[in-house]
Image: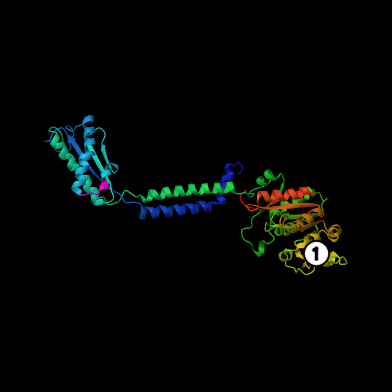
Amino acid sequence: MEELDLKDVYNIMRKRSWIIALSIIIMLIISLVLSLFVLETEYRSSTTLIINDGKSYEYNGDFISIITDERIIKTLKEIAKSSLIINQVIDDLSLDEEFLDINENMKVDIVENTGIIKIEVDYKEANTSRDIANRIASKFIEYVDKHSKTLGIKVINKAETPLKPIKPNIKLNLVIGGILGSSIGVLVILSLEYIDNTFKSAKDIEEKTDLPVIGKISKITEKTDENIFNIDDSYKMLRININSLTQNNIYSILITSSEPLEGKSTIVSNLGVAMAQNNQNVLIIDCNLKKPCIHNVFDVTNDGGLTNLLENYDISYKELIKSTYVKNLDILTAGYLSIDPSNSSEFLDSIGMKYLLEEVQSNYDIALIDSPSLLSTADAAVLSTITDSTILICESNKTKINKLLESKQILEKLNINILGVVLNKNTIY
């Protein structure tokens, strides 16, 4: 994959944004399922204690007697979470052995610059979480009362039954799922882009083939009767570029592609209309003898066409020409192939075909030749040797790089004048 700038990355992400959307939806569903049915629920209960310097102390809002000696408070903190206290709680509440690791779910904190201790306990059951927190506090107070005559500990806030679990945090999990989904989507898109060996832009084509891009045809989002001949500015620019490059010295242009279904016939037809609208006399010849379609585009019959002319030299091409409803534009349909289709290349490589291309020069400014794809049959290669120039069609996100390079190599070996490449269905660049 070539080096991408920010605009390229933006266009790539926009083109495949559905992958990101799908990835986010999947991860949100997974996060929700895990939160509701898989992850263990945890509840948190907390008890708040206060330490004073005399057993006669009663909490009444007067903090003067509160112990603030850091060493004493740290010692008391360690006692509160010691196994001595915890084992008594486990025995009293008949907890499972799994609760022996209570320190993983227990937290003892000192409120800074005070003698206040906060005990927090996380457990899978709300009532048990409350009971553990309160029992730890009571056992802790009993221990201090038994071993110290100067310190006193009182409960400020007794633990209550928590109403909501702290885990799983569904909102947080959904946010994390959304972030992971978008990240995975982006990684998938970049991976696909890295392994994708098709052309995306005119820049791609010119850098990898050293061939000029002479036209960029926009993608038609919906095919209707009104836009069969979608003669927008892209076809007008293609016409201008061709006329500029040929300087009226080229009379026949073969239009082909590496593989089938890359838009040859559509481009030939629309280019013919664009040229005819420019007062050029245009003839479109359907040389795709195995799968002709130009007659369908212009809604004419396919009886009597190129095959009849090449089988019977006594027939004049003028007898087989079909007019269209576009001024200055005629077509010569393929006709019905009466010979073995595997011999179509020999049929096209006949003296009659060469004579036809010479003869039509007297009545037409340009002849546009629609042919099969270059790599699927020898027909296109044969036609390229008897036409003045060749244009290659490349469909964005479909034409493979190696296939177009192979097509270029075939034409160069035949010393064919390659006029350039037309990028079809140009969508993002």
Does residue 59 appear to the left or right of 424 in the view shown?
Answer: left
Report which residue position mark 1 lands on.
306
Q: Amino acid at mark 1?
A: Leu
Q: Position of residue 240 (x, y in %)?
A: 75, 50
328 or 425, nearer to the observer: 425
Rendered image quadrant of residue 64: top left
Picture quadrant of residue 54: top left
Quadrant occupied by the N terminus: top right
Q: Is residue 151 above or below residue 354?
A: above
x 70%, y 45%: residue: 209
Tell me which colouring the rendered structure shows.
rainbow
Tell me where residue 80 appears, x and y as whole percent. 22, 38
Q: Quadrant of residue 374?
A: bottom right
Q: Estimate the x, y position of residue 151 in percent, counting from the top left.
A: 15, 34
Q: Most extreme residue toward the front, as rendered?
A: 97
Label 1 environment density (alpha carbons within 10 Å; few <14, some 14–19, many ≥20): many
Please tell me which residue is depicted at 49% across the width and 48% down the height of the picture.
184
Asked if residue 360 is among those painted magenta in the image, a careful observer would answer: no
Q: Is residue 124 visible?
A: yes
Q: Is residue 97 magenta?
A: yes
Label 1 SS: helix
Residue 11 at least partly seen = no
Look at the image and give the residue range highlighted in magenta: 94-99
Picture residue at 71% right of the left edge, 66% below the top: 296
Q: Position of residue 353 (x, y in %)?
A: 83, 60
Q: How many marks?
A: 1
